[in-house]
Image (cartoon, rainbow, N blue to C red):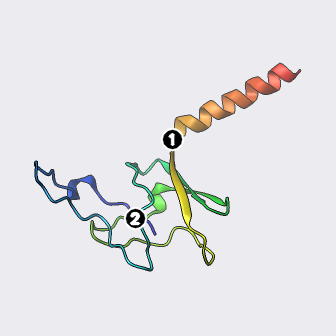
Amino acid sequence: MGKRTPIGEFTCQNRGGKGIKCYKITEKTGNVVGIKAVNDEDEIMIINTEGIVIRMKCSGISVLGRVTSGVKLINLQEGDIVASIAKVRKGDEEDEEETLENTDENED
C-alpha cells in the first residue's frame, strides 16, 4: 500500500509532543516500509523479498489524507513482503546513460 500526502498536513511538534499519525496500520496493510519526500516528476522503485523490482512515476500514486491506508502499489504473493523502496531522480538516469556511453567508447 502506498500514498502521497501533502507535507502541509503534518504540523510541527514541540518537545514532549506525542507524535503525529501518518498511516492507518492494519493486518491487511502491514507496517510502514519507508517514507520518501517526492515530487510529481520523481519515480520510485519498490523491491520485494523475491527480488522483483517495480518502477513507477510518483504522479500515478494517489494523493490521500494523513491517516488513510493508501492504495495498492504492488501485487504480493503469500508470505512475500516489500523489502525496500527507493526514490529515483531524473539526473540519476542521465548519469547512468553517460556512464554506459563512456564504457562503450572505452571497449573500442
Q: Position of residue 73 (x, y in %)?
A: 52, 67
Q: State the SS at label 1.
A: loop
The residue at the point 40 percent across, 49 percent down is 38
Q: Is 88 on the left-hand or right-hand side of 16? A: right
Labels in figure, total: 2
Q: Where is residue 33 in the image (x, y as percent from the top left)?
A: 45, 60
Vertical position of residue 94 compared to residue 79: above or below: above
The alpha-carbon separation of the residues under discs 1 and 2 comes to 18 Å
The residue at the point 68 percent across, 33 percent down is 97
Residues tagged 1 and 2 counted as in contact (Cβ below 8 A): no
Depth check, front residue: 8 or 34: 34
Vertical position of residue 15 compared to residue 9: above or below: above
Depth check, front residue: 30 or 64: 30
The residue at the point 28 percent across, 68 percent down is 65
Res 89 label: 1
Q: Which of the 4 image quarters holds residue 26?
A: bottom left
**Which circle's residue, 1 or 2, is located before the other in the chain?**
2
The residue at the point 46 percent across, 47 percent down is 41
Residue tagged 2: 3
Q: Position of residue 64 (x, y in %)?
A: 33, 67
Residue at the outermost right position: 108
Vertical position of residue 48 compared to residue 100: above or below: below
Q: Which of the 4 image quarters holds residue 30?
A: bottom left
Q: Callout 1: 10 Å neighbours few (<14), some, many (20+)?
A: some
Q: Which of the 4 image quarters holds residue 101?
A: top right
Residue at the outermost front position: 16
Q: Is 62 on the left-hand or right-hand side of 106? A: left
Q: Position of residue 7 (x, y in %)?
A: 26, 53
- Quadrant of the image containing the C terminus: top right
Three-letter amino acid code at disc 2? Lys
